[in-house]
Image (cartoon, grey):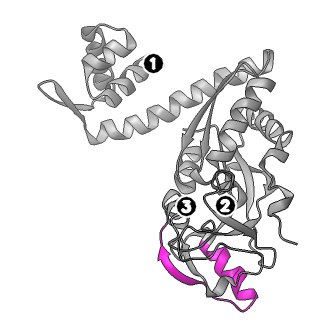
Amino acid sequence: MELRTLRYFVQVAEAESFSKAGEHLRVAQPALSRQVRKLEDELGLRLFIRSGRRIELTEAGRLLLARARALLRQAANLADEVRTATSDLSGTVSVGISPAVSEALAPLVFEGCREDHPKLIIQFVEGFSSLIMDQLLNQELTLCLLHNPPAHASLSVHPIMPDPMYLVGPPPGATQLAPVCDGSDVGALPLILPNDSHALRILIERGMAETGEKPNIAIQTDGFVTTRALVAAGRGYTILPYSGIRDLLAAGRVSAARLSHLNIPWTLSLVSRTDKGCAVQAHAILETILRRRDKLMAPDSLVAA
């Protein structure tokens, strides 16, 4: 089973068309079809169901697609590791990033790597934390940037910085709801929070319970973008880290106050697999972020006493 044949198979499967895959690969369609038939003969299984110009993956084809993607990623990582050992850091690094930190981190990582490692190509993949963690474990990503990652034997966690929590509300004059201030009573406010199994919701409830408070849930949504939009529209208040609201604050679309009296540990971390090639790239990007960490921190004017 050759890597080239697997690349052809993956391209056909993703394009759902031999002709489109051939155009992308710049390979004649008959030659592409022969390679896929060769793969099917080698496995003794049909990988596609052909119906006219339309093709669909069989169950065996879907399984092979998942494994082939991981294998091709491993092959690319191996090539990057060899290049890294013999020259300046280069190759492609696929970075999983959650919506909650993409606004703050993606530009910083991109610009920082362009300055520190100009031969390194950064490919961002945005998704919920659980999704990009699964992709990292399946070797579809090189590393992830997210909050409070769970421990795993196959992963290394590199803390970047604590990300303090803020009570977030509408700006002055937006609706009948008042903007937040340092003395706002969190337990009395209508809150917009994730569902009760969400990691952030669990930490918020635990932190409030320690002070004898209980959240007053007005709206429940797991959507980060939805939560921010509802708060900016004056439909309630929420609790988020500074990295998740810095753009809204800069635009004057929300108000915020540091929740210094609540214990809600929320740490921004870089997560990588433990294999050597990923460790080298993860360390380089970690150092790039740490050298520019002050750009992620809240200005003093937002920090409650």
Q: Position of residue 15 (x, y in %)?
A: 32, 27
Q: Which mark is residue 150?
A: 2
Amino acid found under the numbered disc labelled 3: Arg
Amino acid found under the numbered disc labelled 2: Pro
Name which quarter of the figure residue 151 lies in.
Answer: bottom right
Name which quarter of the figure residue 24 lies in.
Answer: top left
- Please state which of residues 44 and 115 is positioned toward the viewer in this rendering: 115
Q: Secondary structure at mark 3?
A: helix
Mark 2 or mark 3: whose residue is earlier in sequence: 2
Mark 3 or mark 1: whose residue is earlier in sequence: 1
Circle 3 sits on which residue?
Answer: 228
Q: Is residue 194 left or right of residue 29?
A: right
Work out whether 301 lies above or below 264. above
Work out whether 13 lies above or below 256. above
Q: Is residue 103 left or right of residue 5?
A: right
Name the mark nearer the viewer: 1 or 2.
2
* Residue that appears at 40% across and 18% down: 5
Whole-angstrom CA distance, mark 2 to mark 3, is: 25 Å
Q: Residues within 10 Å of mark 3 (few under 14, many from 20)?
A: many
Quadrant where the C terminus lies? bottom right
Q: Residues within 10 Å of mark 1 (few under 14, many from 20)?
A: few
- Please state which of residues 76 and 46 is positioned toward the viewer in this rendering: 76
Mark 1 or mark 2: whose residue is earlier in sequence: 1
